[in-house]
Amino acid sequence: MRFHAWRFTRLIAIIFCFGITAVAQTPSDFKPVKVVLWGTSSFHGGKNPDQPGTFCGRLQERIFPHQLINLSVGGATLPFYEEQKTVDAILDMQPDVVFVMQGSNDIGSGRDLDDTYTAIEEAEARFDKKGIRTVFSTWQPRRDFDEIRQTRLLTLNQWLRNRYASFNRLLDVPPTLTDPDNPLQINPKYDSGDGVHFGDAGNQAWSEQIDLPVIFNFPTVSNSFDGLTGFVVEETSAQTQGAWTKTDVWGHHGGTALLSGESGAAAEFSYTGRNFCVWSKRRNDFGIVEILLDGKLLAEVDTYGVHWPKDDGYRATPIYSSAYVPSGRHTVTLRVSGKKNPVSGGITISADAIEYQR
């Protein structure tokens, strides 16, 4: 089994305060918040989507054990997402919050700004109608843009500020991340090296701009799974029912996982301890997994995810974190529900690993 040190960096507090004084809820009160990232390569991970220093990875660290789903696609434009019916997929997931970062690639493709504004407004209206909180991000400079496109990018950023800043719905790239000698370029300290995407330090500084209690009311957590521990049960120790196939393609926890697309097929992970989380990749043909604890259904989790240019999904992350589980011997069951997101290509689930507290 391969260990990645960044995965086991323990989060500091049992009670999540996020900079404010928090009153702990009882374990039964805890309900994970579901957050969706809908953007392009800057949310997706730029040149290194499988590395921990991405914006997605930094945000996951901040909100864990809440759920983060990254539906961002590098290089995509709004017409691509319209064709893929991505907004429909997000609505079906019923998230609490959606972070939106759109428009830069549309500028690069020569699309008219008014068309971009209209597409963003239409998506906003659909999310608002369902009561889903939306937060819109401005853009960092792009060294690959000529002067005309740079001007259009600045115009898009100002439109986003004018529309969303006064409603606490704006994630604004701070001026400190731009080059003090050339505001049309990323500060070299925060550049990934390509002049288009932030590096690790830039993504960390950018993610820290998110005022979690202001943007959405995070529930506080008491006695829930509060951080990665390193106590892991891999799929190699799981007991299975039904048809499963072993896979060793890129990105699974520990390097391998079991896959099944047979309704009712189940994989059981037994451990002695307390609270737990479930690890899985997301893929464009993955379905909804049922998660049971000691025979009782706890949750159904949608594991669909679009990933480009890789067609083998996102690197495994925690997709579910338990609330209070008393100390003892327990069995976590992952079961193929037979259900899927309407835009997913299948019902397959991944039985990868669980991580638990002793």
Image (cartoon, rainbow, N blue to C red):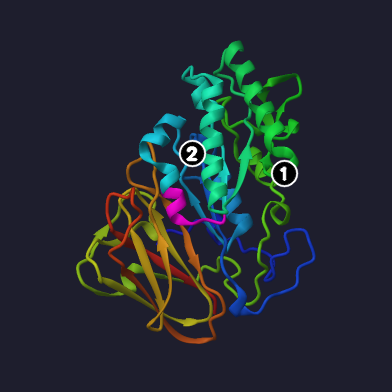
Query: Image height check: is 220 above or below 157?
Result: below
Name the residue tied to disc 1: 167
Q: Please say whether residue 90 is one of the residues in the magenta stretch.
A: yes
- The location of residue 199, given as percent across then percent down, is 60, 36
Q: Residue at x 43, y 69 (%)?
A: 354
Is residue 103 in view from this perspective? no
Q: Residue at x 63, y 29 (%)?
A: 140
Is residue 178 in view from this perspective? yes
- The location of residue 175, given as percent across then percent down, is 74, 30
Nearest-to-viewer mark from 2 and 1: 1
Q: Residue at x 42, y 42 (%)?
A: 86
Residue at the right extreme, as displayed = 21
Question: Nearest the camera: 54 or 347?
Answer: 347
Q: Residue at x 61, y 22 (%)?
A: 153
Could you tell me the amino acid type at mark 1? Phe
The local secondary structure at tag 1 comes to: helix
The magenta stretch is: 89-96
- The location of residue 221, given as percent across then percent down, is 65, 71
Neighbours of disc 1 within 10 Å: few (<14), some (14-19), many (20+):
few
Relative placement, left or right, of 20 versus 92 is right
Label 2, label 1: how far apart the Cα atoms are: 33 Å
